[in-house]
Image (cartoon, rainbow, N blue to C red):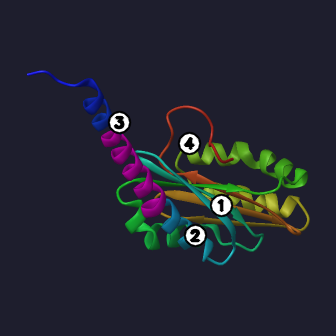
Amino acid sequence: MKLRILPVAITAVLSAALLFGGWYAYGHYGVEKPLEKVASSLPGVVSAETSNSVNKVVLKLELSSDADLADIYHKVETEGSGSIGGKKLELVVSEPENEQLEKAWRSALFGVAESMEHREYSGVQDAMDSLAKKVPGLTAVTEMDDTNVYVSLKLGDAAKYVILPRQAQEMGVWPNA
């Protein structure tokens, strides 16, 4: 039996194109677009962009200064559960930098990190309350659920949102701090 190279090569290329094209189309239209639609419809969300990988879905959000971070996370997780499936949801919040907010956050970071390390989550709220007393006009809101601690800092029209995972990471700092 003699195999012809050209028909075998064409069949292999077409099969690979169909397989990977279908995989890409499912990821884009079956996971990313529905999740972006859910996130964009929530109050406080200015824009949403999704990237999908094998074991997690990363949702990059731009939030307005009056957004409720914990509520957005929960609604995306529940309403988008069909798209997310068994993958891990990771929210990355991007906001314009405000030097005064960044400085205030850095001054409280030691107490926050220590509280997170010792799993004494009320220390995060205490650190944010003392920060709000130190910085005039700063509003600090701290919320917690079974997976994350959510910190929202607001100063005038500027806002900073931080999601601190309750499950400690092995090495490094919080990726979104």
* Precedes in sequence: disc 2 or disc 4: 2
Q: Residue 117 carries which label?
A: 4
Secondary structure of residue under mark 2: helix
Residue for point 78% across, 59% down = 130
Q: Quadrant of the N terminus?
A: top left
Residue 162 in the image: above or below residue 16: below
Secondary structure of residue under mark 1: strand
Residue 67 coordinates in the image, percent (x, y): 70, 72
Q: How far apart are marks 4 and 3 (CA)?
A: 51 Å
Does the residue at mark 1 contact the one at mark 2 (Cβ under 8 Å)? yes
**Foreground residue, 58 or 166?**
58
Q: How far apart are marks 3 and 2 (CA)?
A: 37 Å
Residue at image mark 3: 13
Task: State which region is magenta.
Answer: 14-31
Residue for point 43% across, 56% down = 25
Residue at image mark 1: 61
* Precedes in sequence: disc 4 or disc 3: 3
Residue 7 coordinates in the image, percent (x, y): 26, 33
Q: How far apart are marks 2 and 4 (CA)?
A: 31 Å
Secondary structure of residue under mark 3: helix
Amino acid type assigned to the residue bearing label 3 in the image? Val
Residue 151 in the image: above or below residue 72: above
* Precedes in sequence: disc 1 or disc 2: 2
* Precedes in sequence: disc 3 or disc 2: 3
Q: Residue furthest top?
A: 2
Residue 163 vs residue 17: left or right? right
Does the residue at mark 1 contact the one at mark 4 (Cβ under 8 Å)? no
Secondary structure of residue under mark 4: helix
Amino acid type assigned to the residue bearing label 2 in the image? Ala
Q: Distance between the residues labelled 1 and 3?
A: 38 Å
Does the residue at mark 3 contact the one at mark 2 (Cβ under 8 Å)? no
Q: Residue 49 carries which label?
A: none
